[in-house]
Image (spheres, coloured by chain):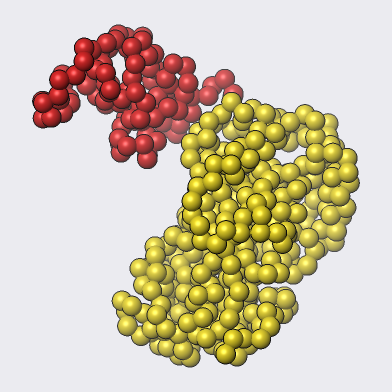
Chain colours: A yellow, B red
């Protein structure tokens, strides 16, 4: 097997395939976790997903993350089962949030309503004038680069996985992957885990996969004492993720880290692969974070990083074989949820490649759903 | 002058001035950063880490690594390698995250 992409999805796929006894080569044109994964926040969320296939995938994936934390050590992943807290600014937003929590509960999500006067017990520094919130204990956090390294280390420990970083794929055909530095590699199947660049990789095989970049900034504060205990965000974030608009959407997702800095996401813009820093976006994120946590208004931001969330038109990932090329298995396009969805994605990929009955119906993620291919 | 490239570049700086480090009066030259002035005084560490209380000073010296943080005129987490030192600047050793008031 060849896995293209040494990010979170690629590492999880390599690990799942190697544990099934398969020989795997993991290729990446850059370093480990150097693309989509390294620019993310490490969110493992069920709270931001409505009932449907993505939530089903997320519930299984978060269960698998707990297993990984048990097997590899929570410390090795900086796994923190801190829980999420979604807050509503006004009674109307709180009513909508409660309604969506009721639906999520039917899909296996634990969601506890938190009245306004009890928010302070969960988050002592939270703004006072909020209407209420919902607590999602399943939400968690990992440090993405550490998690990738830990999974690749375990995969390589089987003796069946080769890691070829700094290796660009130049051609893809059935049974054969052309590379710039390691010549051709022969394989039974190829897993496309190239994240935001998954469309380019698919095109090498003549396949079409409309993965596009959505730029997101994350603001990093100076190190602070523990001030923010959960992943805290305003209910508007969910609407931003689902938005079809190319314009800027932003709503603060605020969380503390083991090292001390507070991370403030999450903006979304469709600006292609433009990496330039946008001060207005950062200012808006900072203002929204300070609105949720007034204590942050006197804290300084140290730096910001940005990356491209790989989105597909219907905001679902592509997982499964290309309809015309069963040897090419897509595993990309997870937008901002790839870290969280990686273990369950890898499980699906491994089950599909192994001819085993998948744990859930993979049809909604089918790469053929985007219509006719280009000739 | 225990450390500094002044001779190498044949610098002829303006007259020195005083600033304080943990209450002690030290001398700096115009244009120096806090880190340069502390190095010149023979000090290599001016921060204690958040985990393990270990000493830290300038590592990269160019603003990237955030190892050289000091408390500058009462503001914590200032990069000593970028902040210019001025007459009367009060520099203090930073302990931990420097935000005990938020604890």
Quarter of the rendering occupied by the C terminus of chain B: top right
Count of numbered circles on the image: 0
Q: Identify which residue, A336 or A259, lies in the foreground.
A: A336
| In the image, residue B19 above or below residue A72 | above
Q: Identify which residue, A112 or A363, lies in the foreground.
A: A363
Q: Position of residue B38 (x, y in %)?
A: 28, 21
Q: Residue at x 53, y 31 (%)?
A: A300
- Is residue B73 shown to the viewer in this render? yes
| In the image, residue A304 above or below residue A371 | above
Q: Is residue A174 left or right of residue A321?
A: left
Quarter of the rendering occupied by the N terminus of chain B: top left
Q: Is residue A224 left or right of residue A227?
A: left
- Is residue A60 shown to the viewer in this render? no
Q: Residue at x 42, y 27 (%)?
A: B78
Q: Residue at x 70, y 35 (%)?
A: A292
> On the image, which quarter does residue A364 sit in?
bottom right
Q: Position of residue A264 (x, y in %)?
A: 60, 42
| In the image, residue B42 above or below residue A65 | above
> On the image, which quarter does residue A32 sit in?
bottom left
Q: Position of residue A226 (x, y in %)?
A: 59, 33
> On the image, which quarter does residue B36 sit in?
top left
Q: Identify which residue, A160 or A125, lies in the foreground.
A: A125
Q: Residue at x 54, y 59 (%)?
A: A308
Q: Position of residue B43 (x, y in %)?
A: 26, 22
């Amino acid at each position: 097997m060849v896995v293209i992409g040494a990010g979170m999805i690629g590492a999880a796929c390599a690990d799942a395939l190697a544990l099934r006894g398969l020989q795997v080569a993991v290729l990446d044109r850059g370093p480990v976790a150097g693309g989509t994964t390294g620019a993310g926040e490490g969110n493992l969320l069920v709270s931001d997903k409505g009932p449907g296939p993505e939530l089903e995938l997320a519930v299984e994936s978060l269960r698998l993350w707990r297993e990984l934390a048990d097997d590899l050590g929570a410390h090795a992943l900086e796994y923190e089962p801190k829980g999420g807290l979604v807050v509503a600014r006004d009674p109307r937003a709180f009513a909508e949030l409660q309604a969506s929590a009721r639906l999520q509960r039917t899909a296996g999500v634990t969601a506890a309503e938190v009245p306004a006067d009890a928010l302070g017990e969960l988050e002592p520094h939270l703004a006072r004038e909020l209407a209420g919130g919902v607590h999602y204990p399943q939400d968690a956090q990992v440090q993405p680069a550490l998690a990738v390294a830990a999974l690749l280390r375990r995969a390589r420990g089987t003796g069946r996985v080769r890691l070829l970083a700094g290796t660009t794929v130049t051609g893809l055909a059935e049974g054969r992957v052309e590379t710039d530095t390691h010549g051709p590699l022969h394989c039974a199947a190829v897993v496309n885990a190239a994240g935001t660049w998954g469309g380019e990789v698919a095109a090498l095989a003549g396949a079409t996969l409309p993965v596009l970049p959505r730029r997101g900034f994350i603001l990093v504060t100076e190190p602070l004492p523990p001030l923010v205990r959960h992943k805290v965000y305003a209910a508007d974030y969910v609407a931003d993720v689902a938005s079809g608009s190319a314009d800027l959407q932003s709503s603060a997702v605020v969380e503390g880290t083991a090292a001390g800095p507070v991370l403030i996401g999450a903006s979304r813009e469709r600006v292609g692969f433009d990496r330039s820093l946008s001060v207005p976006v950062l200012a808006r994120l900072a203002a929204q974070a300070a609105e949720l946590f007034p204590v942050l208004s006197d804290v300084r931001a140290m730096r910001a990083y940005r990356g491209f969330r790989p989105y597909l038109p219907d905001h679902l990932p592509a997982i499964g074989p290309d309809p015309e090329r069963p040897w090419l298995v897509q595993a990309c396009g997870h937008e901002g949820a790839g870290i969280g969805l990686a273990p369950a994605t890898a499980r699906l990929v491994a089950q599909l490649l192994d001819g085993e009955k998948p744990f859930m119906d993979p049809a909604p993620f089918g790469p053929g759903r985007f219509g006719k291919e280009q000739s | 002058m225990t450390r500094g490239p002044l001779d190498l570049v044949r610098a002829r700086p303006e007259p020195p001035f005083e600033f304080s480090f943990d209450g002690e009066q030290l001398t700096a030259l115009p244009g120096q950063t806090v880190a340069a002035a502390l190095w010149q005084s023979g000090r290599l560490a001016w921060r204690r880490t958040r985990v393990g209380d270990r000493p830290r000073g300038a590592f990269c010296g160019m603003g990237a690594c955030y190892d050289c943080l000091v408390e500058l005129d009462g503001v914590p987490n200032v990069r000593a390698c970028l902040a210019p030192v001025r007459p009367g600047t009060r520099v203090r050793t930073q302990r931990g995250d420097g935000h005990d008031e938020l604890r």
